[in-house]
Image (tube, grey):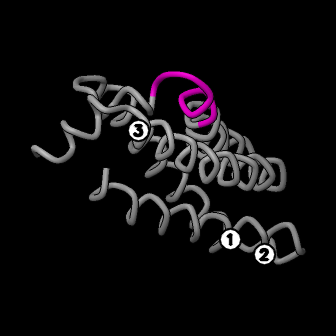
Amino acid sequence: HYKLLPFHFGIVALGSAAAALELLGFGTGALNAIGLTVSAVETGIGARIELNRSGATARALHEGASGLLLRAAGLLTGPVAFVLRLLGYGPVAAVCFLSGAMLSRYGWVFAGRLSASDPEETIAAQRS
């Protein structure tokens, strides 16, 4: 997922910065707009990951601890934060987004370790 990760990490970093500023008391309309946009993009990324279940390389993202962490992170940074922002619960959405961002980092680390220890996945990645 070398094409997806830089974009995903950049979007999560932008959303985390906006959420942190919002929690520090800078609740402006611009931060809410950034939070809405980032949550919408994360919803799309999460849907793409969930729908792409084919091949050995997708196994680490859907099974075990890494799969659980990535699903929870995808929900917290995507649809949960988006809906909470639409309902006017900006600070709660910010906490959800920051929690999901942290879970996402750990989920990707665990997925990398799981994929590195799976010979079938390693060979599949080398062939593509």
Mark pair 1, 2: CA separation: 5 Å
Q: In front: mark 3 or mark 2?
A: 3
Spot occupied by residue 9 in the image (x, y as percentages of width and height): 49, 63
Of labels 1 and 3, earlier in sequence is: 1
* In-front residue for pair 36/99: 99
Question: Is residue 44 in the magenta section?
Answer: no
* In-front residue for pair 66/27: 66
Residue in the image at 26% along x and 29% along y: 120
Q: Which residues are magenta?
A: 62-69
| Furthest residue in direction right, as rendered | 25
Residues at circles 1 and 2 in contact by the CB criterion of under 8 Å: yes
Residue in the image at 51% along x and 44% along y: 113
Mark pair 3, 2: CA separation: 35 Å
Residue on which disc 3 sits:
115
- Badge number at residue 89: none
Residue on which disc 2 sits:
21
- The amino acid pointed to by label 1 is Ala
- The amino acid pointed to by label 2 is Leu
Q: Secondary structure at mark 1?
A: helix
Q: Secondary structure at mark 2?
A: helix
In the picture, measured across the screen, residue 105 lies left or right of residue 38, that is: right
Local packing at callout 2 (Cα closer than 10 Å; few below 14, some 14-19, many 20+) is some
Question: Is residue 64 in the magenta section?
Answer: yes
Residue 99 sits above or below residue 23 on the image: above
Of labels 3 and 2, earlier in sequence is: 2
Spot occupied by residue 60 in the image (x, y as percentages of width and height): 43, 31
* In-front residue for pair 65/40: 65
- Badge number at residue 18: 1
Mark pair 1, 3: CA separation: 32 Å
Main SS, magenta region, reads helix
* In-front residue for pair 28/24: 24
